Amino acid sequence: MLARIIGATVLILALGPGIVGQGKVVKEELPFTSSLGRTAIGLPEATDRGTWDGTWIYVSRDVRMALWLTRDKGKTIAKIQFQGTISGDEAFETDWTGTANYSVQDLPGIFEFTLKNDDPDRLEADWYWSLDLRGSSRTENADIQMYRAGNGRRMVMYFKDFERIVKSGGNTRRFALPQAWTFRKLSRRLALWEELPL
């Protein structure tokens, strides 16, 4: 049952709101099976339309995010603001290096989003996120591929090698599941968080 839920979640995250019907969707099979057989993720086809610079947003039931991309000294740089919507406790904003040190209930968290290349049509990044809570912890690592889709105002953030490690009560659980989020471009300028329709 869990595999079915995970598979459905991955597919929904990949397509995201507003992406269906905007170009071809490419299916990529995942390296595991569920009770329903082989599992796949649907990814919108890449385009060279549009540009990276500007304000991108992602909204789901659990997450509200803004990603700002711009160029500095000839290099693309990124800043992210995150707000969790389930408990409302977890929120942070990185600096332009993609790093944020923050706290939840006075306990430390760190988030790092590091761009690894600078390409007109594809970006790659490292994702690291760690949060220590009383008696438990959560750590995420991923290699991310990013590309524009549709009319160039959609951006797919594909977590190709995603791993989440959860430690609680002396137990360690590992979840390794590719997933993808689809951002939409709100503005070519760097809009303020307060201006975003989140």
Image: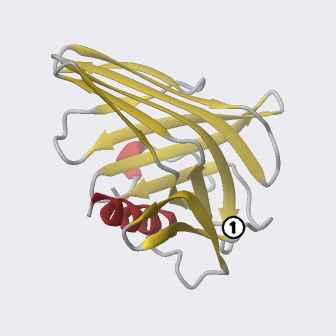
Residue 71 in the figure: left or right of residue 181: right
Image position, residue 80 (x, y; %): 49, 37
Tag 1: residue type?
Answer: Gly
Q: Quadrant of the C terminus?
A: bottom left
Report the residue at 48% width, 75% height from top: 18
Position above or below: 104 against 1: above
Residue occupying the point 80% across, 39% down = 118
Quarter of the rendering containing residue 17: bottom left
Residue in view at x 47 percent, y 37 percent: 163
Asked whether 114 or 10 is in front, the reply is 10
Q: Is residue 49 above or below residue 6?
A: below
Q: What element carries label 1?
A: loop
Residue closer to the observer: 122 or 31: 31
Residue assigned mark 1: 152
Nearer-the-camera pick, 100 or 143: 143
Say if 58 sits above or below 93 in the image. Answer: below
- Residue 78, picture quadrant: top right
Quadrant of the rendering where the N terminus is positioned: bottom left
Residue 153, horizontal then vertical, whole percent? 62, 66
Where is residue 72? Give x, y as percent: 75, 30
Front in this rendered view, residue 157 or 71: 157
The location of residue 73, given as percent across then percent down, is 81, 27
Count neighbours of disc 1 (C-alpha within 10 A) and say few if under 14, some if 14 to 19, many if 20 or more. Answer: some
| Image colouring | secondary structure
Q: Residue at image x 19%, y 47%?
A: 86
